[in-house]
Structures are given as structure tokens and as C-alpha cells.
Amino acid sequence: MLLEVNELTVCYGTVQALNSVSLGVSEGEIVALIGPNGAGKSTALKAICGLLKSSGGEIISGDVLFSGQSIKNIPPHDLVKKGISLVPEGRRVFSSMTVMENLEMGGYIRKNKKSNLESLDRIFELFHILKERRKQKAGTLSSGEQQMLSIGRALMLQPRLLLLDEPSLGLSPNYMEIVFDKLQEINRSGTTILLVEQNARMALEHAGRGYVFKIGEIFLEDTGKNLLESEQIRKSFLGE
Amino acid sequence: MPYQLLLNGIIAGSIYALIALGFAIIYRTVKFLHLAHGIVYTTGAYLAYTFFILLHIHPIISFFLSIILCALLGIAIDKSVYYPLRVKKASNLIFLLASFGVFIFLQNLIQLVYGAQILTLRTGPVKEGYHIFSAVITPIQIWILVVSCWLLVILWGFVKYTRLGKAMRAVSDDQVAASVVGINPDKTILSSFAIGSALAGAAGILISLETNIEPTMGFSAVLKGVIASIIGGIGSIPGAMLGGFFLGIAENLGIWKIQAGWKDCISFIILIIFLLLRPGGIFGVKTEKEQI
Ligand SMILES: Nc1ncnc2c1ncn2[C@@H]1O[C@H](COP(=O)(O)OP(=O)(O)OP(=O)(O)O)[C@@H](O)[C@H]1O
Ligand SMILES: [Mg+2]
């Protein structure tokens, strides 16, 4: 297992958000976390990438292992060095900086600038539009373009594990499709992906496996295909 | 055209621009009003006095020693006062009050050590000035102008092109995103305090070449810096510079038509006009969302 979450319990102050959640992601997979609002999907992702503390949460018990090593409570700026990159909810590009500068910041910690140029080539190949817009301020891009930029920025360090929180949020259906196709392409070239998604259908169609959250717990785990076909899921999440 | 007033305005403006730029660099990363910036300015003047007048150290060395110590003072204020508050997620009002507390504390400390009397960095008599158009500029004023413009250009290039400068811009845009790409926000905040405070110190020293040093000098200075920063667009680097020069020139040209006693009023009138008509300042775009 590349990533293992073992019996994780998380609280925000006195409010418990996760109750003994366990999940795993193997090298090369795309795994989706789905579930209704407030079920704890983002909390699980934040606990993995070290952002819990800054939003006032705390891991009460359990552990998070990345290739066998505990990464519990490692701050996000140290986690990137281990090969985990995050595409945060709401994209969060550096809006006053240009597209190029945003991508450069993605490779901030790297001393070897030559690898940055290689990453840049790969990202421009993946998202042509970013190359065209490289001198434009990121704040002036459309939401879809910003999402691509945010993904590109996270790919600069060629991470082993890519985490995404709600990549389809606020995108037009057309862009959603593009983003998810690109994620599959990124995955095929060797990056493991764990994503959280409101849009359960889109996520399950593109993911190998899925976990379904319900009020702080995981209540189903299966392949994307099986979950899509499951009666229970169709009723409660796909609106059929 | 009263060239002398215009020239005085440009010189005062260059000092305001330095204070405002330092203030803006800090504001961008922490997003609260660091009023204690004014006491760092005062400290710069007193340190230069100590090195140059009391210890007879070479003026250039005194200048650099003083601004380095001001940078360290900025770091110390952040580490000892603001950092603990940040950990506790204190509100901006608390930061403002704490900043004011630091200001008062250090101002009293300076008064305790140096006394309340007026001091000066000047040694000899004032040298004969040069004539340009109908105005006179003294060698000291030329120094003030050259050094402050040089600092403004260096800082602008630093923020735009260097790795640390870009990290500071990234933290200013989005702290979470910055930490996600591997920037340590606490380190970046410390750097901005060091650089901003060095600028405040430099401004304090430069102004003391022209006017007197006294423990209370920092208060109106930081107000001018904040006003310049707001009319330029709070947190904007070019805005702070432009705002500083604008304020200096407006104040000095103002006394052409109004009595000199009203000089300090002018900056507040300008502030109110800007807050009413263009609250985002000259360069401000996203100020509406940001709360002071
Ligand atoms: N910063 C916070 N402070 C306090 N409680 C929080 C915080 N963030 C989340 N919670 C609570 O934790 C629970 C899980 O929230 P979380 O954001 O993880 O859900 P989610 O599954 O991502 O929902 P959504 O689909 O709406 O994004 C919710 O009950 C929420 O109210
Ligand atoms: Mg969420």
C-alpha cells in the first residue's frame, strides 16, 4: 500500500468529524472518496496532507502511513518533499501571479531547476491552454483554466501521490469531463491519485475504486464500476 | 509654481514611500495593521545616533548596523508577540491592540534610555545648497533622495524576481496554497518583518539627517505610512511607493495655499477622500474582501 489510513478519529474542538476511518490506496490506483455534504471527506483528505491543524481540527487517534512511514501531523510544507501534492478545494491559485509564476511556485522547493523545466514541458503538453496563457495573471483565468493550473502546479514536483479536493467544483460539465480525462492520463503515466468528489457519478466513472462516506464513517467500499451499479448508491447519490 | 515646496514634497514623499513600502511588505503577509512599524522607525534613528554620534562609528557603517538591528527588532516583535497570537488564531483587533502595546512599550523604553530631549545626527553647520530652477536642495537632501530611491528600486526588484520575493507574494495571495507547494509560511512572515523593518529603520535614519530625533517621532510617521499605503492600495508594492510620494507632495504643496499649521490635516483629508471615493486605493483591486 502506498497510502494507509488506520482507524483515524478526528475532531474539530468537541465536534467529531471522523470516527475510526480506515482506507488504503495502492500504487497506480485512482481512488475516489464520495458521500453527502458534511460526511467527512475533506476532513479525511486534510488529515492526510497536514492541513487539519490550520483549520482547527485534530487527530485524536489512528495513524496515516505513506509507503510505510507515519506522516501524521507533518505540516504540508514538509509533506511535499515526501512526494505528496495537493490540489486544494476551490483551486487556490496565486491570483496576482502569472500562470508561469504559479507553475514555478509548484517547483519552489526544488534546487535543481532543470527538472523544473522538464516538468514544465510535460505540464504544457498535458494542458496546452496553460502554455498559451503563461503570461496572464492567474486570477483572470476561468474556473476551468484555474483548475488545470492548480493541477499543473501540483504536478511540478512529479509527486507519487496526487490528492484532489472537489476538482469538479464550479466547473461546466464540459470542463469536468476534460479535467477527469486528464486525471486518467496523469494516472496512466504513473501518478497515484486520491480524490474527494461531490459529483459521485463523474468520480466513479473515472476511478478504479471508491469509498462511500456517511456521517464520519465509511459505509461502503468497492470498485467504481460496482458502486455505479449498486442499487443503494444509485438511489442515494446518483439521484435515480 | 512653488518649486521649493514641490522639492520638499518629493523628499518627504521618499521617506513616506519607504515607511509605506515596509508597512505594505509586512501587511501583505500578515494582513493586520502593524502599527509598531512606527517604533522601528524611531529605533532606527536612535541606533544611528548611538553609533554615529555617541560611538563615533563611520556614518555608512552606522547606517547599515542600524538597519540590520532594526530588521532583528522586527523579527523579535513577530516572534515574541505576533507568533504566539497567530498560534492562538487571534482576531485582527487583538493584533492591532498588541501592536499598539509594543509601540507604547518601546517608545517608553527609548525615552527611559535616551531621555525626552531632542537629539540630532547633524554635526557641522548646514552646507550651502544647490540651485535648481528656483529651489534649493542641500547635499543631505540629495543623499536622502538617492538612498531612498535606491532602496525602493532594490526592493521592487527583490519582490518581483527573487525566490524569496516570489514566496512572499505567494503567501500574500494564499497562505494555504503557499504551504501546499512547500513554502513555510512562518519563515516567510519572519522574512517580511525583517525586510519591512529594515526599511522603516532606514527611513528613520534618513529623516534624522534633516530633522530632530525624539521618542515620539514614530507615531505620525506610521500614520503617514499607513495612509500612503491605503491611498496606494493597501498591500500593493507600487501603490505604497506612489502613495508615499503623492502624500508628501500633496502635504507640501498644500501649504502653498493653506497655513502651514494645517499640514498634518492634509493627509487625513486625502485619506478620507480616498476612503469615500476610491476605497481600494490607486492600485487596490481586492481590498473590498480584506478587512483591516
Ligand atoms: N473547520 C471546521 N471547524 C469545525 N467543524 C468543521 C470544520 N470543517 C468541517 N467541520 C465539520 O466536520 C464535518 C465533516 O466536514 P467535511 O468538510 O470533512 O465534509 P465533506 O464530506 O467534505 O463535505 P462537503 O461535501 O460539503 O465538502 C462536518 O460536520 C463539518 O461541519
Ligand atoms: Mg469537502
Image: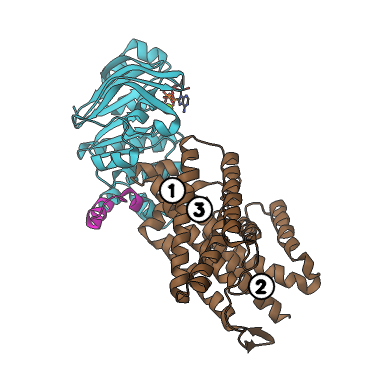
Chain colours: A cyan, B brown
Q: State yes or no: residue A106 in magenta.
A: yes
Quadrant in the rendering for residue B128: bottom right
Please report the bounds of the magenta region as a residue range: A103-120
Find numbered disc 2 in the image and state the secondary structure of the residue it sits on: helix
Closest to the observer, A184 or A100? A100
Sequence order check: which comes first, mark 1 or mark 2? 2
> In x, y percent, where is residue B259?
81, 70
Quadrant in which ligand 2 is drawn: top left
Find numbered disc 1 in the image and state the secondary structure of the residue it sits on: helix
Q: CA distance from mark 3 to mark 1?
A: 11 Å
> At x 39% / y 17%, what residue is drawn?
A216
Q: Chain of mark 2?
A: B
Res A181 label: none
> In x, y percent, where is residue B257?
80, 72
Res B171 label: 1
> In x, y percent, where is residue B115?
62, 61
The reply to whether discs 1 and 2 touch (Cβ–Cβ < 8 Å) is no
Q: Which residue is mark 2?
A: B9
> At x 39% / y 30%, what residue is drawn?
A52
Q: CA distance from mark 3 to mark 2?
A: 25 Å
**Disc 2: CA contacts within 10 A as few (<14), some (14-19) or many (>=20):** many
> At x 55% / y 71%, what residue is drawn?
B206
Up the image or down, B1 lies above or below A51; here it is below
Question: Chief secondary structure of the magenta span?
Answer: helix
Which amino acid type is marked by label 1? Val
Find numbered disc 3 in the image and state the secondary structure of the residue it sits on: helix
Whether residue A185 sits left or right of residue B53 in the image: it is: left
Closest to the observer, B277 or A204? B277
